[in-house]
């Protein structure tokens, strides 16, 4: 969801708004008369960043968050996609379960955090459960929709050519649903990322979300803002460097098969 | 092209609604049956009946209606204000050709900082309470709306703008007659994306910074070992979201976007 | 608005549902206002001094934290005995609004302490 910039001049000028923002920040914090807990000066931010990097805590939090995210993403999708395909292959089963899946998709993620704490206590278990839950329900929903919206004409055409059993699966179901599945990867990741940050804030014992909310108790606004910037950067990298190219190379290249 | 949707009567007759209802029923029965089989204490794994009793109790004591009303009120206010601010900012930024391109990287970056990450900062600034919740919601909605407004306006062919101007239209008229209608499909798609994230954001914000509301109910239930109440909150959240999405958001998008622009279903965008 | 236009407007799900909800809410408000007037009668309200009164609030259940918070926001919560809460210095308008709530069984003036 980016506003694309084209020429090199554009890319360079991309730094301008950030410089402006930093300039405004410096002015406000030094001359705006704001208390330190509202807007810490840039110098203090730099010191905090340097210290957190030096004592390894920053690396620990970032790697912890990414690790939890990766496990949950793989786990959630590995269970959901095959299960979703299995459910969607049978018309009756998918008709039975579709409203249930829709319902669970609408509450997936953050709403499960308190329950997760009861079941797994504070810490990694709860956070991984919540993220996996989010990704699972998102992926299963996309997968079922993906299989169900394979155009009937395509279905009939493949069957006409004498495809049976496994062939139907590899020639029709998998490629047909792949578009939705890949799109679903990106959107479930978006919700999963939010679930990660939120889960770490409420039920975590380490990670960027935890680091950010802990700092609130001590009014350490510099740590909070540091956490926010890192959360933003990480999401940008995940979305732009991982999912956008994936989507571009697959879905966009193939064109949207349905709709 | 208007794709006709099956009406309620047709869907009932096709048996899909019935099958869906049976599916829900099966899940409920499986849940209830699994409780004695699993044998865990009630605060750990409440039965469906326990949840139903808790729901009735919460209504009987007047707690649930108040919580639901509070949540919905915050949601409506946040989404309304967020949309207004997003569209206004989008129009303002688009007034000058270069501004959108200049600000784009900053906007992209700020939006990448998900709304849940802003809540600690807001809590430091404003403590706990309604303001934090509202501002978070406004943030969640304003950004996708702002984006899509900018994108929508950018894609308005220069021909249209020139046409209005050559006919002697003022800048205000250009905005009203050309830019806004052309960008409207995008704006509405952004609105639906924002509304979706806003609902989840609302629940989270209420868990952290509120004393009433569904999010608070979900949190409070586990704090007092009344897990059945937590599940009541979760179910209400799901029912409410399905209601909002299917009664208001989807039909609205269908009626406008399908009529005026390409059908880019916001379903894919989550 | 013409009949045809009105019917088309109502055919929209959002409009019909919103209208139904508004009607239901209106009916409920009317009923609770009527019930409220019975719980806290005009004679009982007359005991107010300077726009405030001491109130004895009886619920259908033992009050929880939620209700305590609500009652405390209305006046001084002195004591809670079983299903009854005792408040002092409650503004009359607040008392009337409390009477309208369906989960309140009865209100009565109280001489205070």
Image: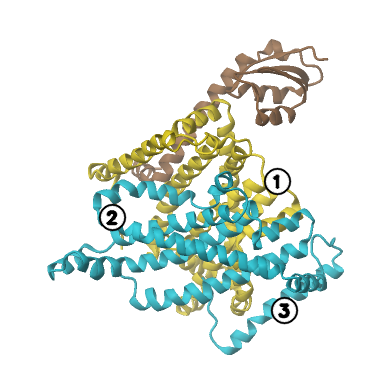
Chain colours: A cyan, B yellow, C brown
Residue tagged 3: A19
Counting other residues with Cα less than 10 Å from the Cα at mark 3, is it few (<14), some (14-19), or many (20 or more)?
Answer: few
Residue B184 x, y percent position in the rendering: 47, 63
Label 1: element kind: loop
Residue A24 x, y percent position in the rendering: 77, 72
**Looking at the image, is B226 positioned above or below residue A219?**
above
Quarter of the rendering containing residue A237: bottom right
Residue B82 badge = none
Which residue is at a point 59% across and 54% down the rendered structure image? A199
**Disc 1, disc 2: CB below 8 Å?**
no
Residue B129 badge = 1
Residue C65 x, y percent position in the rendering: 68, 30
The subunit letter for the residue under badge 2 reads: B
Counting other residues with Cα less than 10 Å from the Cα at mark 1, is it few (<14), some (14-19), or many (20 or more)?
Answer: some
Foreground: C42 or A179? A179
In the image, B188: left or right of A59?
left
**Disc 1, disc 3: CB below 8 Å?**
no
């Amino acid at each position: 969801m980016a506003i694309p910039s084209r020429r090199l001049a554009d890319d360079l000028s991309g730094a301008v708004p950030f410089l402006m923002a930093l300039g405004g920040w410096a002015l406000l914090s030094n001359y705006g008369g704001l208390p330190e807990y509202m807007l810490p000066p840039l110098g203090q931010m730099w010191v905090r960043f340097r210290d957190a990097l030096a004592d390894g805590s920053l690396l620990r939090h970032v790697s912890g968050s990414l690790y939890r995210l990766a496990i949950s993403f793989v786990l959630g999708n590995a269970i959901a996609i095959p299960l979703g395909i299995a459910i969607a292959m049978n018309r009756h089963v998918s008709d039975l379960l579709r409203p249930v899946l829709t319902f669970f998709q609408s509450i997936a993620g953050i709403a499960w955090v308190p329950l997760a704490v009861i079941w797994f206590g504070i810490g990694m278990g709860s956070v991984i459960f919540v993220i996996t839950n989010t990704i699972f329900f998102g992926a299963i929903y996309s997968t079922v929709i993906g299989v169900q919206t394979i155009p009937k004409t395509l279905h009939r055409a493949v069957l006409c050519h004498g495809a049976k059993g496994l062939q139907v699966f590899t020639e029709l179901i998998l490629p047909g649903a792949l578009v939705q599945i890949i799109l679903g990867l990106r959107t479930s990741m978006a919700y999963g990322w939010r679930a990660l940050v939120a889960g770490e804030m409420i039920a975590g014992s380490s990670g960027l979300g935890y680091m950010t909310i802990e700092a609130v108790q001590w009014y350490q606004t510099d740590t909070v803002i540091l956490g926010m910037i890192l959360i933003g950067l990480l999401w940008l990298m995940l979305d732009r460097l991982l999912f956008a190219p994936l989507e571009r190379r697959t879905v966009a290249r193939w064109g949207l098969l349905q709709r | 092209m208007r794709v006709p949707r099956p009406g309620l009567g047709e869907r009932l007759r096709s048996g899909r609604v019935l099958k869906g209802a049976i599916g829900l029923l099966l899940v409920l029965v499986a849940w209830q049956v699994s409780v004695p089989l699993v044998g865990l204490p009630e605060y750990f794994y409440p039965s469906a009946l326990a949840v139903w009793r808790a729901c009735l109790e919460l209504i009987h004591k007047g707690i649930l209606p108040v919580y639901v009303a509070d949540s919905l009120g915050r949601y409506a206010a946040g989404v309304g204000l967020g949309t207004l601010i997003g569209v206004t900012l989008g129009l303002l930024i688009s007034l000058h050709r270069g501004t959108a391109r200049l600000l784009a990287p900053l906007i992209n970056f700020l939006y990448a900082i998900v709304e849940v990450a802003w809540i600690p900062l807001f809590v430091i600034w404003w403590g706990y309470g309604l303001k934090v919740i509202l501002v978070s919601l406004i943030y969640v909605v304003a950004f996708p709306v702002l984006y899509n407004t900018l994108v929508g306006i950018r894609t308005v062919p220069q021909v249209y703008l020139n046409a209005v101007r050559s006919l002697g239209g003022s800048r205000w008229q250009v905005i009203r007659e050309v830019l806004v209608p052309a960008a409207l499909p995008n704006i509405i798609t952004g609105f639906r994306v924002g509304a979706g994230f806003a609902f989840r954001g609302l629940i989270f914000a209420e868990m952290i910074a509120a004393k009433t509301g569904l999010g608070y109910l979900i949190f409070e239930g586990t704090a007092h070992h009344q897990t059945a109440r937590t599940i009541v909150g979760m179910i209400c959240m799901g029912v409410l979201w399905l209601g909002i999405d299917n009664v208001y958001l989807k039909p609205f998008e269908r009626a406008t976007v399908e009529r005026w622009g390409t059908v880019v279903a916001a379903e894919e965008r989550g | 608005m013409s009949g045809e236009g009105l019917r088309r407007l109502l055919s929209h799900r959002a409009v019909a549902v919103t209208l139904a909800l508004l009607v239901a809410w209106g009916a409920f408000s009317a009923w609770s206002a009527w019930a409220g007037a019975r719980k806290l009668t005009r004679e009982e309200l007359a005991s107010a001094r300077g726009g405030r009164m001491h109130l004895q609030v009886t619920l259908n259940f033992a009050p929880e934290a939620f209700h305590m918070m609500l009652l405390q926001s209305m006046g001084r919560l002195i004591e809670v005995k079983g299903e009854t809460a005792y408040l002092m210095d409650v503004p009359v308008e607040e008392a009337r609004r409390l009477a309208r709530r369906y989960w309140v069984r009865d209100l009565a003036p109280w001489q205070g302490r």
